Image: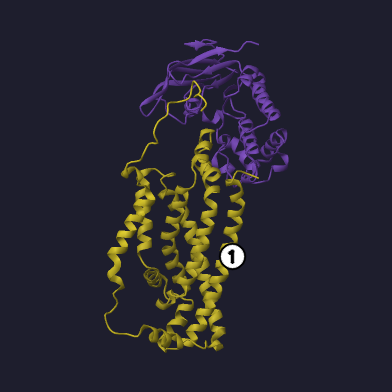
Amino acid sequence: MSPEPANSPPVVALPELKWHERLNVFTVTLLAFLLAVLASLPALRGSGRQLDYWANIRRFLGYFFPPDFSVWQETLRALGETFQIAVMATLFATLLSFPLAALGARTIAPRWLVLPARLLMNGARTIPSLVWALIGVAIVGANPLAGVIGLTFYSLGYLGKFFSDAFESVDAEVARGLRAIGADRVQAFQHGLWPHAKPLVISHVLWMLEYNLRAASIIGYVGAGGLGMQLASYYEYYAWEKVATVLIFILALVTLLDLLGEWVRGRITKKLGGGRLGGR
Amino acid sequence: MVAATGKDSPTCHVAIRGLGLRRGDHWLFRGLDLVVPRGRFIAVVGPSGVGKSSFLSCLAGLVTPTEGDIEYCCLQRGLHTPANFQGHTGVVFQHNLLVPNSTVLNNVLCGRLGRYPWWRTLLGFPRADREAAFRIINDLGLAPLTHRWVCETSGGEQQRAAFARALFQEPELYLADEPVSNLDVYLTGRVLGILRQESLAHGRTVFCVLHNPELVERFADLVLSFDPADPAGWKVREVHR
């Protein structure tokens, strides 16, 4: 065996971690979730009646086939209106979410502003989209604008939270570095934080658009325009084969949006991935 | 107090008095007194973990020292603390701190954010700035990468982009934390040569963390060395050529 070099540090045993030092955010969250699962088991009990679940499923799904495509024209028109409601609501929610999200991000806003901003966003999320749509109908009457208003406020709660989390989760070191070379708060955000958060923000907006498209198909129930009105009348007359046609149209549009979102996300992560692995 | 000039001299640029920084239960450095005249190149040396980067962070106003203070003497504008001298300090960070999903040009342009109010840079930089930034990018051999995202460039290219950002800023003071750690011999000489020229020709003071003793002797005027065994055992010496 070769002699030890003169300046080598003394040999010590591998330090062991204590049980509480092994706890981290992941293990604690997992533990909390397992406890929540155990506490939620009663939800699986059902009604307690002797029902033939499979026969029920087969019978009900059977009503949807074959789909009745004779309603394709009115479905397409209502789908167009639903799309317009979803797009406008997503646009307004995105614009309104930015300042709110910035106020709710601990890395950007002072502490005393973070809590009220988060409370506002939580409040907006707590109210279901159907109730928001009802509020919209109460304000502007039964028309697509009510849907836009309703979904804007509902989305505001979600996008605000998503954007806030995005601003907090991205590396703020670059923004701090820019402040150190003279940039003001807005410049540090625009040039240091925003480029990091941009891929996440785009991804969230696309998700919200997709969500709003589905939500806009429902809010017509309360008179807020779009496919919901049509769906409500079909449900009322048990015209399930027509409902199937509407669902196929919604599915097609949502899938199209999902593919677009995947493509955008893929392009962004592919470009960023190279850099994270240490350049070319 | 170690000084190559008096604190009240018009050539004084940086005055450090009794500076100390504690991390947890141990001091990184203590009682650091240093007066640096304008236009000097100070190499900051010492083994890893001794507090060189933390010292630079104190100078940049990013870390508040546990004791003591730092004062920048500006000929036109009087005395400044590090926090309100930030627009005049060009920093080459150890990990570059570039925006990965932004172009090399945009990253370099960020060097002049401090010159403009936010609304002037909201939609971009003036054409003259873009051209001046490109000249520096070209000088550092990065012209083909001008419009590439930083994450698509190599470690050495990113380090040069970070250096270009500091140069483009035209600051009164450079704080460079291992600015040549990813560069080959030629580029190392080029980058340190430019920093040396900045100090000689434009009177811009340079604090530069270096590990290579040959480079220290070749480019520095003063050497500030930290002692890992003794927080108050820092030393300053002049380099004689």
Amino acid under disc 1? Leu
Query: Residue B154 location in percent, x, y?
Result: 65, 41
Q: Chain of mark 1?
A: A
* Chain in yellow on the image: A
- Residue at 57% x, 20% y is B43
In this view, the residue in front, B186 or A261, is B186
Examine the image and state in which quarter residue A128 appears. Answer: bottom left
Q: Is residue A32 visible?
A: yes
Examine the image and state in which quarter residue B120 appears. Answer: top right
In this view, the residue in front, B15 or B222, is B222
Query: Residue A75 location in percent, x, y?
Result: 53, 81
- Tell me: residue A165, above or below residue B112: below
- Tell me: residue B136, above or below residue A241: above
Q: Residues within 10 Å of mark 1 (few under 14, many from 20)?
A: few
- Residue at 62% x, 52% y is A271
- Tell me: residue A181, above or below residue B1: below
Quadrant containing the C terminus of chain B in the rendered view: top right
Q: Is residue B13 visible?
A: no
How many circles with numbers are drawn on the protein? Answer: 1
Classify residue A215 as left or right of residue B103: left
Classify residue B90 as left or right of residue A31: right
Question: Does dot 1 land on a helix, a strand or a loop?
Answer: helix
Residue tagged 1: A260
Query: Residue A46 location in percent, x, y?
Result: 29, 77
- Residue at 64% x, 46% y is B152
* Chain in purple on the image: B
Query: Residue A267 location in percent, x, y?
Result: 61, 57
